[in-house]
Amino acid sequence: MISAFIYIVIMVLETLRLRMLDRKLNKEEWLPVVTESGQVTGRVAKSVTIALRNKYLHPVVRVALIHQGRLYLMNRKPDRVLNPGLLDYPFEKYLRYKHDIEEAVLNSVSSEIGDKEIPLQFMLKYVFENEDTRRLVLLYTSVIDDRAAFEKLGLVEGKLWTISQIDENMGKDIFSECFELEFEYLKNTALLKYTMENHA
């Protein structure tokens, strides 16, 4: 009689434990593990991979916002794994498992400006690694020259930086590591295109 009661209690406790674990797993954000070419080889929980730091390579979408030849930069949120508090683009998002890149780009943008649509162009794919993280970075640009369209985005936490302002402050622990790697490329592509078109 007592052993049957103990058995029932153990079964109830185990059932409750499994339900709690199932709820936790359903709330977990899963990230794809990828190769340097972007091929998905598996998945891992975001909470786990953060604790393991740079063991796995995960895709991250970044969008540089350009207005009239200047880059819009704002401080990275304090909860970011990489360079919290340093200046960077307003849009960045991990690509989630079984989500496509377009969805990640839209999620990155909508987390800052809601449902507003902005023009997007893919620019660059590269691997970034430091002691805290490994990322397959997918860099996009959004060029918005119209002042009214830019102001309609409602971004208030950052400011527009000129090329010369950025050049003067490179390497001074002001900008994120990824931004400093990408800036020279942007300066010689999207930003150069604006300069050539508007000073011809």
Image (cartoon, rainbow, N blue to C red):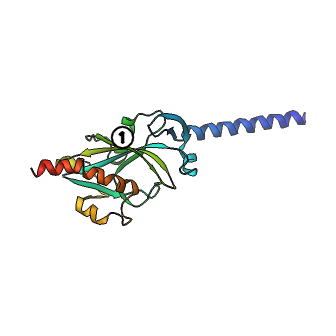
Does the image show residue 170?
yes
Q: Is residue 130 left or right of residue 198?
A: right
Percent position of residue 83, x then y: 44, 58
Image location of residue 38, percent across then percent down: 44, 37
The residue under the point 55% across, 47% down is 55
The quarter of the picture where residue 176 lies is bottom left
Residue matched to label 1: 105
Q: Residue at x 86, y 33 (%)?
A: 4
Q: Residue furthest left?
A: 200
Residue in front for this viewpoint, 15 or 119: 119
Pick the residue in front: 184 or 29: 184
In the image: residue 16, left or right of residue 166: right
Q: Secondary structure at mark 1?
A: helix
Q: Residue at x 39, y 53 (%)?
A: 178
Q: Is residue 51 left or right of residue 120?
A: right
Q: Residue at x 25, y 40 (%)?
A: 119
> Which amino acid type is marked by label 1?
Val
Q: For label 1, count other residues whose C-alpha is less than 10 Å away and answer few (under 14), some (14-19) or many (20+).
A: many
Question: From the viewer's perspective, is residue 28 above or below residue 171?
Answer: above
Evaluate whether residue 151 shows in this view: no
Disc tally is 1
Left or right of 45? Residue 142 is: left
Quadrant placement of the N terminus: top right
Task: Return the x and y of residue 117 as percentages of the image width and height.
Answer: 27, 40
- Return the x and y of residue 152 as percentages of the image width and height: 23, 48
